[in-house]
Image: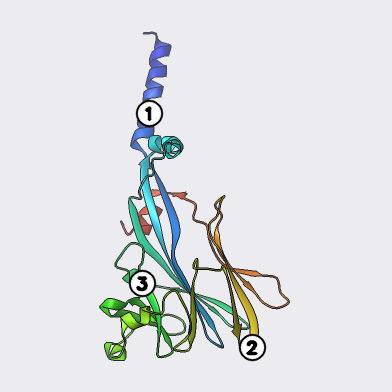
Amino acid sequence: MSRRVTILVTVIAGVLALLAYTNVYLVRPSLNAGVLYWNSHEALILIESSTAGVRMSRLRYALEPLSSSLGQVRQPDRQRCTQMLVIRITDRNVDHYETDLYRHATVPYCGMATVPFRGQIYMGYLAKRRVWKWTGADFAEAPQEELEEFNPVESLSHGFQFEHVDGWSMRTFGQGTPKYPMTLNGQQLTLGFSGEGSPPRPLSLDLSRPGQQPETIWSMDGSPRRVNRVEYEEVFLLR
């Protein structure tokens, strides 16, 4: 074998080894649940989202488009609840509150339910009576004595939308119309939800006020993105 061929074979072997034994890290956020509550003076949007992650060799990553075209869908290696966001809307302002409630999730996709009770909004695992109350800027664990008359079955029986239950009306995003009109302190507002379509596009919530251009108050791009190993391990608490 000539020296030139030997060098070429060595280079190819080195490239294949690099592709086979070094990894690519991908993460992808997804919306698990989005719920709108409103009364006569404020609206609350509660958003649960999780992140899925995949670690694969560079060789597998290079072949992934071919695998997808053949109908092979790779399941995530990791998934965890990563966000519990509350957006508060009034006739004047929009405020965002990043809460740490996601740290209490017991399943990767969050899986918490929300209900009104005695005029307050509660969120958590209702059947287990592990519940947190919205305090205006964060969630606080609800004392058990506060929940003595709380009936989770009755609370969930109102379904994915209702009117004037414990002072609140509710809609779940993705159920029925993507437009949600409401009146806050006498002002007519409309919340619009844009879901995934074809071709795929980011999710978004747009708020319309009289005489103003719609304002995007939340969005999520669910496309996979590459991260380094440190970022991947931090997202999935591997460090």
Left/right of residue 203 with respect to residue 12 in the rendered view: right
> Could you tell me the amino acid type at mark 2?
Gly
Mark 2 nearby-residue class (10 Å; few <14, some 14–19, many ≥20): few
The circle drawn on residue 186 is 2
Label 1 secondary element: helix
Label 3 secondary element: loop
Position of residue 32 measured from the top left corner of the image (x, y, whole percent): 42, 64
Quarter of the image where one finds residue 187: bottom right
Q: Nearer the viewer, mark 3 or mark 1?
A: 3
Whether tag 2 and tag 3 are in contact, CB under 8 A, the answer is: no
- Pointer 2 or 3: first along the chain: 3
For the C terminus, give its image quadrant. Answer: bottom left
Whether tag 3 and tag 1 are in contact, CB under 8 A, the answer is: no
Position of residue 77 measured from the top left corner of the image (x, y, whole percent): 33, 50
For the residues marked 3 and 1, what is the alpha-carbon distance in whole angstroms?
45 Å
- Pointer 1 or 2: first along the chain: 1
**In this rendering, is residue 109 above or below 90?**
above
Residue that label 3 marks: 112
Mark 1 nearby-residue class (10 Å; few <14, some 14–19, many ≥20): few
**In this rendering, is residue 87 above or below 59?**
below
Residue that label 1 marks: 16
Position of residue 83 measured from the top left corner of the image (x, y, whole percent): 42, 67
For the residues marked 2 and 3, what is the alpha-carbon distance in whole angstroms?
32 Å
- Pointer 3 or 1: first along the chain: 1
